[in-house]
Structures are given as structure tokens and as C-alpha cells.
Amino acid sequence: MTLLTLESVTRSVELPGGEQLDILRGVDLTVNVGDHVSIVGRSGSGKSTLLNLLGLLDTPTSGRILFDDEPLASLSGSRRDRKRGRDIGFIFQQFNLLAGRTALENAMTPLLYATGKQFWNRTRIASEMLDRVGLGHRMQSMPDKLSGGEQQRVAIARALVRGPRLILADEPTGALDIETGASVMALLDEVAEQSGAALITITHDANVAALARRHFRLDRGVLAPVDVNRVLALAMPESTP
Amino acid sequence: MTSTEIQPSRRRSGRPPREPRREPRGWASALVGAVIEAWDELRIHRTRVLLSLIGVGVAVCALTSVVGIGAIAQQAQIEQLERGSGRPASLIVGAPYNIATGTQADPQQYEAALRTAVDRYSITYSGSVTWIQQAIQFRDGVSIAESAQAVDVDYGVMHRVEVDQGRWFIDRDELRLAPAIVVNVAFWQRLGSPDLRTNPTVTLVGAQDVTAIVIGVTPEPPYPEGPRMYILNSAVAGLQTPEQIAQNFPQFEMWVPPAMADELTGLVRRDISAAFGEGWQVDVNRQDYLSWEGGGDPIGPIRMVLAGISVLILVLGALSLVNISLVTVRQRIREIGIRRSFGATASRVFFAVMMESVVATLVAGFAGVVIAVAIVQNPWVRSVVASGLTDVPPFPIEAAVIGLGAATAVGALAGLLPALVAVRVKVIDAIRY
């Protein structure tokens, strides 16, 4: 069952000199329910722009994006916001936890925008999710008292509390050491699997990308499928692209 | 493969696909959520919020205090005016006179006509007032009273006469052989400040000296005054010669409902004129402060000045709040972006930022109102603003409502600009901020 479709999507911006910069060129991508897709690419290849489009944070210059076979262009801004809150969970490289709030309060944040039982039971839901990511004993800790790995676990719990159907992970291990990154990715993969959500990991780390089932490479705005071995080969220091 | 030993996932296979969900729009959860969000923000940044709200709290306190003290001062002023001119509506009936000859009416006939009118229109409080000249034998010699008024029992109610010691006249005092008098503090002190329970007496010097009993002492006014006294009209006959009595010019007062004042003025004038026949005229006029030109709010100008100062303080407080809020919102751009990424709509962000401002100023306003109540209800403040109040007004509710309303309005206005800034935040840029 198709969850998200990008059809000939382009995104360009106008430079101060009036020149047009094409960031994404004719991107086609289909993500199914429960899928795990990785997108690798160098800095400046358009990864973040693609993430913003996938996360309904931005609109394409041309082409179509369909979510549940519904063109996003037909949705108003507020409906798109609500859909994003309901169906998409974000995990950022820098965790982006809210300062001054406990791990529990951070995990509850998306539930403040939910309705019905999700809203009224937000404390219980967030507590259960933190417990699930192994932070049941750190619920009242402030972000600055948590290690990098723990912070990213809180971020994962926060991304999952509303039961999203799509998880977008932007360099999820970028701010972590290798071992912590590995355990965080294993956790992310596991909880995404258990919740049945599709997972799109955007990274420049080939090892993280290799965890996915389908792999893509973004190069100068062009998205193309790539073999997992090729992805891993890219990670070898002696390898050449 | 690196040392992290990450293995490609092959586990995603058999889980059934999830159907898209449709959530009902929950206005209650949206409202509660926005309030929680606003409150959390205030709680976390309480020091900044507290500092930024001091100005608003002080302004609201000032505004509420001005309104509250103004109401008390107004009541005090009104009571003061009512002591002099009578309570609204007080009609004063002059002695009838013949238009052609200028002669005045026979006092007995005049009084009979007045009593008929009072009975006819069921006027509860009425009476005549005569200013007399009265010499008094004090311990240190004879002095003329600064003021001596011959009144009826109803005068005390009609003119809000307060008695600090003893009491005002009652009907039975008319039967006394030794007349009762109510005096002021200066009079009482000249007598040696006697205990009223000992029924102190004083000699009223006149055609024949009369011993009077002091039954009450009025409160000391804030200004100096000489000896003053009240005596019942019925007792004046024993003090004065018939010639003196004939020269008295009593004025008759009636306390009537303000709504009926105009109608009764005409009716009483007509009735008394009719009692004397053609060619006789009588003047009936209102004398209470409400009938004076521009007398509606005797302390209006002072109140306007104080309110103006308070509004100015409020505006300055609001400006500083706007300033701090704008800076704060710019510091919170990243947080706003994160919230947007989790589904906060632009309207929700706008509402939350507005709510923060409104909730904060409402709390500050509440604190300001509580302090204002404490100030206004303080006995010392009350004694300074309005000593000798008969009807002590409670803290005026309108003052609290105005204070809280002003705080809310300031919060909404101060929140508007930051809220607009917050809505214009570009989510993508904000997250990278």
C-alpha cells in the first residue's frame, strides 16, 4: 500500500542575483507503508530540501507529492500541518529537545496538538513510550542532564508518541559516537518496525543507510536507487565513488 | 562492515498496513492544549516573565486603586455634600409671600399648609430649619455659637448627621422640659469634655436663660471650627421672645424620591399657593447637590487626572511588555519551528503566543488587583481618603473588573505583535536556527 509518492518533483530557489538554483531535479520516489528507505548524499546534494518536502514542511516548485494518494497541493496550510502532526514523526540530527522541559514533557509535546484520547492521556502515552525506549528511569531528567544517546532516545519517543505512519530521520546519528549511533539506529529500526511506520533515513553515513531495505542516493538534486553493497562501499575510506 | 556491526534490516515484512486515520477536530483539547502550552512557557521562563510583568502589575494596581479609592472618595464627598444640602432629592420650600404687598404669610398658616402637603403626598421625612443666634454660657465665659440650628428630628436622617458620642434627637426629646442639644467637638470641649452619661448641662443665654442637656457630640471635622449646636424647633420658643421668633425665617425641607422630585415640586408649589389664595406665591426648589449645575460627579476632574496617569503607566507597562515579548519570540524561533514540525498549526502558534501574553498579564493583573484591594481596604488609607463615612462602600467590583479587563487587553495587545512574528516563522529555517 503506497503511503507517499513523489512524481517529478523539483525544487529551486532564486539567488540574490536573480539566478535560479535547482536543488532537486525530477525526483520520483514511492514509499510504502512499513517501508524502510535510506537516502544518502553529500553535503549540499539536496537532502534537507528533500526531507522538508517529504515532511510537508515545504512545497515543490513543480511536480506532485501524494500522501495516501491525495495530492498535497490540494490541502490547505492548516490541514497540512494537522496531517504532519498526525502522520509524520521527525527525528533531527541535533535532537531539538525543548530546553527547560523534562524528558517526559518533551515526549508529550506532539500530543499537545492531538485530540481526543491521545490528548487527554498524553502523560500515560509519553511515559509508556519513554519506557519503551529504555528511559523509564529518566523521565524527569532535563535534556542537559542526558547523554547524547539518551537525548536521541527521547527524540525518538517524541517522534513516535502520536503513532505516525511515516518517520523522517534527518542524520539521526550525526551527533552521536559510532556505538551510541548504532544502538540508537537499532532502537529506531525496532520501534518503527513494531509500530508499523515507514522509516526514511536521510544520512551521509553509509552504515546507517545500509540498515534500510531500499537505498537511494541523492547527487546534485537527482535521486537514484543504489545497491546496498555500493552504499557500503561508499563508506570504505579507500573506496572511490 | 564497520566495527559497529550494524546489519541491514530484513525484518519488515508481515505487518499489516495501517489505514489513514481521521481524527475529530477537538476544540476543547485545542483550547486546553494552548493554555497548557502557554502556562508551561510562563512556568519555565518565570523569572523573565516576572520581571517583564512588574510594570503591568504595578499599572493595574494603580488603575484599580485609583478607581477603588475614587469610589470611596466620591462616597465621602457625596456624604459631605449631603450633610450640607440634604440627600437627593431635597426640596426646599420658602415662606409664601404676597406678590402685590410683599408681606410674608402667617407662620402658623404656612406650617399648616406644609403639613397638609406632607400628609397628602406621604412624604416620610420633612422638617423646618431655622438659623438662630444663640449665646452660650461656657466655663470661660459667654460666647455666641458659630452656628445654631433649630431643626426637627428628621433632619438627622435627611442630612446624614453623624454623632460620635451620645445620640441624635428622638421624638421623645420634644417633651423634655430642659431642651436637648447636639453639639460639635469644639462646643463639647469648651464645656470641659464631660462624659455624656452624666447628662451634662449648659446654660443657653437668651430672653430667659435656659438649661439644656447635651445628648450628642458630632465628629471632629478635619478643619477648625467654633462651637456649633442643634436644638429642636419645639424648644426654640422657650429661648426667644415672640418678636425674635417672628423675625426667624425657617426653611422647610422635604426628602423625596429623586424620580418624583420634579413632579412633587410643582404639586407642592400649587397646593401651598392655593392654601393662601390668589396673589400669593411660594418658591419650591431642589437644593441637593445633584440639582447643581455640573454637580453629578463632584470629584470627576480629580478622578480623570488619576485615571489618566494610571492609563499612562499601563501604556508604558504594555510597551515594555511588547518589547520583551518580541525579543523573546525571536529567541524562541527554533522552538516554534520544532512545534510546527509536530503539527502545531499557524493559528495554534498564534493563539499560544497570544495566550502566553494574556495568561501572564491576567496573572499580573490579578496580583495587581489583590494588592489594590489590600490598599483600598486598608483602614489607614480609608481614614485618610474618607473619614467619617456613614455608608462605607465595599471594594467597588467595577474597579476589579476594570483592572482585570485592562490587564487582559494589555496582554492581548502586547501579544499580538509577537504572535504575528511567530506565525511568519519559516519552519525549515526555524529548526536550523
Image: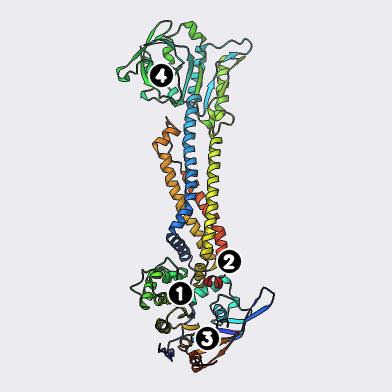
Closer mark to the observer between disc 4 and disc 1: 1
**On screen, residue B213 above or below A14:** above
Q: What residue type is labelled 1?
A: Phe
Query: Circle 2: is it few (<14), some (14-19), or many (20+) Cα within 10 Å?
Result: few
Label pair 3/4, CB-CB below 8 angstroms: no
User: Could you say which is closer to the camera, residue A43 or residue A166?
Assistant: A43
Judging depth in this view, the residue of B99 and B402 nearest the camera is: B402
CA gap, disc 1 and disc 3: 20 Å
* Residue bearing mark 3: A40
User: Which residue is identified by label 2?
Assistant: B424
Name the kind of residue labelled 2 in the image: Arg
Q: Do labels 2 and 1 share a chain?
A: no
Q: Which chain carries label 3?
A: A
Say which amino acid is labelled 4: Ala
Q: Which chain carries label 1?
A: A
The tag on residue A95 is 1
